[in-house]
Amino acid sequence: MQVSFATLQITPTGYKKSILDATVPVRAYLLANGIHDYNAQPKGQEHKKIVHSFLLTECEKRATQTSVYRPLTKDGDPRMWIYGLKEIVNPDDIFALVAYKEKLYIINLTQTSIERAFVSPLENPIKELITDIHRVEISVSEELLGLIKEHMSDWLPAELLADTGVGRTVETLLGIPMNDSKNPDYKGIELKSMRVGSNTRSALFTNAPDWSLSKCKSGREIVNKYGYFRPGLNHKTLQVTVSALKPNPQGLALNVNGIDKWLEMNYYDTLVLSNGTFKKIDDVAVWSLMYLHDRLAEKHHETFWIDVESRVRGNYEEFRVTKIEHTKNPILPQFDLLLEQGKIKVDLMLARPSGSGDTYSFKLPSKYRPLLFPEREFYVIN
């Protein structure tokens, strides 16, 4: 039984001052779980937010508070102050932040074995928390499965005859409004619909490069340098797939930089060198691998991959659900390996001069899904 969490290591300086840096993974985790959005928070103590929290050990549950804020100094770098943290940690200890029902639970991973606490025959605060979280997750997945069986077992018309028609209709039937949220679709469960027999790759998530790390500072700059003209358009566009195996016709390819923990998109000479490699010409864009891990973890902590049978009747499409693959807890280091192997690729859709609507979509063929999501169940509907 697994529970998602974020981790922090308390440095001797952080221990002394009781002030913690809210790292990118921590910020992403707090945002994904509805705890706090640092990006929307003004600087200054008057804008700090207090989050109800608990310090957990195998023997005790102590109520406390966590202050999340951005100081006026240090460029407003996000900070945290967990009241009473020194009671359960020492300098250099690593601890977990677990978000549940708008509260934070803090567990010292250096001094406490979560697995030992969970399998213990004795009741304890950590076991109680994990059991409660799991019970809620089971309830939501059973609810969602019931709704799909009730509304999508028989043939029904799609809202529109288009690639997105089935997915749009599934969300409408489940009462999910159209939105561009980065969070999962249904009460923490992501939904992905695909027609049976389709060769379309599954989109894991979309995420723009980190422009502060990138040589190109926008999608429009990438298009201006590496895009092309299409008939009927008076401006360049760039709608291509990029992988780590070899440069595409535009000379773009990915590189997993394990030293800096970056995913790089570079420009290469497309001629193969004598040693079978390609000569790099220029840097283009960069993603933080840790941030991509967080995007994957928050988006696909739990996912229903919905297979649908489809048929076209005149000017409309009908579909029904045939099978669902229910996955949980992606193996994050596998993400990097699948990128290196060219199994995960990035689709660039950079089309408009304004840059609005630009997408950078990370996609994986369904046959490789078990490599990233080994924890899975199947439900046969038809």
Image (cartoon, rainbow, N blue to C red):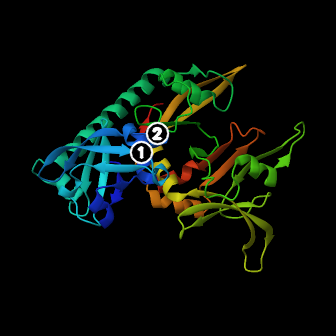
Instruction: Please rate how many residues cluster around mark 2, counting C-alpha atoms within 10 Å: few if below 14, some from 14 to 19, many from 20.
Output: some
> Camera-side residue: 258 or 242?
258
Label 1 sits on a secondary structure element that is loop
Label 2 sits on a secondary structure element that is loop
Q: Mark on residue 160?
A: none
Outermost residue, left direction? 122
Q: Residue at x 31, y 36 (%)?
A: 102
Outermost residue, bottom direction? 274
**Distance from the alpha carbon under mark 2 to that under mark 1:** 30 Å
Left of 286 or right of it: where is 45?
A: left
Looking at marks 2 and 1 on the same chain, the residue that comes earlier in the sequence is marked by 2
Quarter where residue 249 is shown: bottom right
Q: Nearer the viewer, mark 2 or mark 1?
A: 2
Identity, as a three-letter code, of the amino acid under mark 1: His
Task: Residue 265: give x, y in percent of width and height.
Answer: 67, 59
Task: Residue 34: give x, y in percent of width and height.
Answer: 39, 37
Residue, disc 2: 42
Instruction: Please rate how many residues cluster around mark 1, counting C-alpha atoms within 10 Å: few if below 14, some from 14 to 19, many from 20.
Output: many
Left of 364 or right of it: where is 301?
A: left
Q: Is residue 202 visible?
A: yes
Task: Residue 377: give x, y in percent of width and height.
Answer: 39, 44
> Camera-side residue: 197 or 209?
209
Q: Are marks 2 and 1 in contact (CB under 8 Å)?
A: no
Q: Residue at x 70, y 36 (%)?
A: 356
Residue, disc 1: 301
